[in-house]
Amino acid sequence: MDLLATRISALANEKRLWILRWLKEPDAFFDSGGTTSRHGVCGLTIAERLGVTPATASVHLKILTQAGLLHSDRIGKYTYFSRNDAALAALADEIRHF
């Protein structure tokens, strides 16, 4: 039950919902000029799209990652993020059968 509450809490913010939506189709929402890779989308690029500081975006990304809804991959000084679609599907199933 704790994981369910953590994940629902992570989704209770409009900016975090936008992040998940954008990461579903990153090529449609982000310029691929070095900001996207097979590892995901750079956190700085996500911050820019959200219209917030990198520190604020980092908080949102950390909450989604800790809830297991995002994967993060640190490469050098940058962190790239991608959706954890398996976790999102499991969450949808759990809510459906709650």
Image (spheres, grey):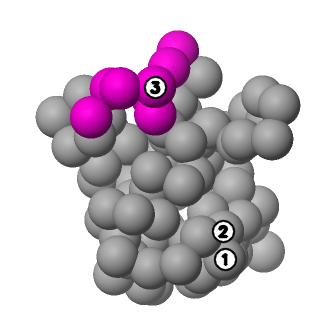
Residue occupying image coordinates x 59% and y 70%: 54
Residue 36 magenta-highlighted: yes
Q: Is label 2 or label 3 in front?
A: 3
What's the CA distance linking mark 2 and mark 3?
19 Å
Residue that label 2 marks: 58
The one nearer the camera, 19 or 35, is 35
* Circle nearer the N terminus (2, 3): 3
Horizontal side of 70 relative to 83 (left or right) equals: right
What kind of element bears circle 3? loop
Near mark 2 (Cα within 10 A), the count class, few <14, some 14-19 or many ≥20, is some
- Residue 10 seen: no
The one nearer the camera, 15 or 35, is 35
**Amino acid under disc 1:** Ala
Residue 31 placed where, x, y %? 27, 34
Residue occupying image coordinates x 57% and y 52%: 43
Residue 38 placed where, x, y %? 52, 15
Q: Which mark is residue 97?
A: none
Residues in magenta, as a range: 31-38
Residue occupying image coordinates x 35% and y 76%: 51
Residue that label 3 marks: 34
The one nearer the camera, 33 or 8, is 33
Residue 32 placed where, x, y %? 33, 26
Marks 2 and 1: CB-CB under 8 Å?
yes
Residue that label 1 marks: 55
Horizontal side of 93 relative to 59 (left or right) equals: left
Up-down: is 84 above or below 54?
Answer: above
Quadrant of the image occupied by residue 9: bottom right
- Residue 30 seen: yes
Looking at the rendered structure, the number of numbered marks drawn on it comes to 3
Near mark 3 (Cα within 10 A), the count class, few <14, some 14-19 or many ≥20, is few
